[in-house]
Image: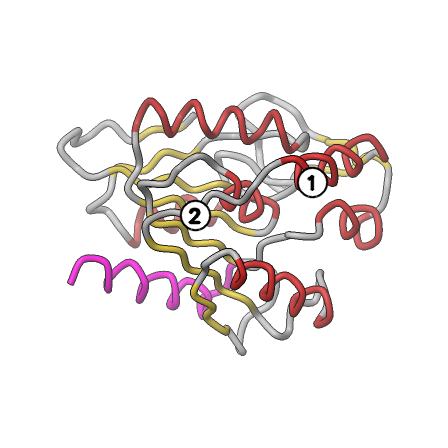
Amino acid sequence: MNKKESNTSKPTAMYIHGLASGANSNTGRELQKLFPQYQWILPEVGEELGQAIDKINDIVAQYNPQIVIGTSYGGLMTMYANAPNATKIICNPAVNADVSLAKNIGYGTHPYFCQRQDGATHFDITPAICQGIAHYKATHQVIPGINNHAVFSPNDELLGKEATLDNATMAYTNGFVIHLDPKGGHRMSSSTMAIVEHIINMLNV
């Protein structure tokens, strides 16, 4: 876990990275720069959904973040994270990851996009990983925060329009306010970040 320690009086926020990323993700660093009024926690999680959410829940219990942001696979984790007292912001969450990982990425070994704190350079997508995601979703409920926002791009090149619509419907059904990002794609773009900035600034009005 990467935790900025310069000012312990700051409110705490947490960012959950997506698949193939880590605590050193560019998005996490950009959030630290864009919102220096928060003390950021950037945990590093693995591909197994249940284990990742357990780790996130332990951190939430310890630090009680006011904001939890997750992108892609991290967005799915954020939806199920036990953080009912936080504002949750999910960006292009991979709600159907049990299907999309196998379909859009494929089984096998893949490289990480950034240098991981745990030293790993590659990760595996296996049928067991995807079955575990499906089982977790079937046996757990989404946990809403005090404010819930979801950002979706109609041009999500990884998930596709049909899956994005299904994911947005699921997020809306679970109490998330939907924001459309017509200029962005699946990854966190400047237009996506601008929407996140607007949401956070509204919280502080």
Position of the C terminus, as image quadrant, is: bottom left
Q: Around disc 2, counting alpha carbons within 10 Å, would you say few (fewer than 14), some (14 to 19), or many (20 or more)? A: many
Q: Which residue is mark 1?
A: 138
Residue at image position (37%, 40%) is 84
Residues shaded magenta = 188-205
The amino acid sitting under disc 1 is: Ala
Residue 66 image-quadrant placement: top left
Q: Name the spot of residue 26 as percent of width and height, x first.
A: 48, 47
Disc 1/disc 2 C-alpha distance (Å): 17 Å
Q: Is residue 193 magenta?
A: yes
Q: Around disc 1, counting alpha carbons within 10 Å, would you say few (fewer than 14), some (14 to 19), or many (20 or more)? A: few
Residue at image position (71%, 64%) is 163
Q: Nearer the viewer, residue 1 or 204?
A: 204
The amino acid sitting under disc 2 is: Pro
Q: Of helix, strand and loop, which one carries label 1?
A: helix
Q: Of helix, strand and loop, which one carries label 2?
A: loop
Q: Earlier in the sequence, mark 1 or mark 2?
A: 1
Q: Name the spot of residue 24 as percent of width and height, x first.
A: 48, 36
Left or right, 33 with respect to 204, comes to: right
Magenta part, dominant SS:
helix
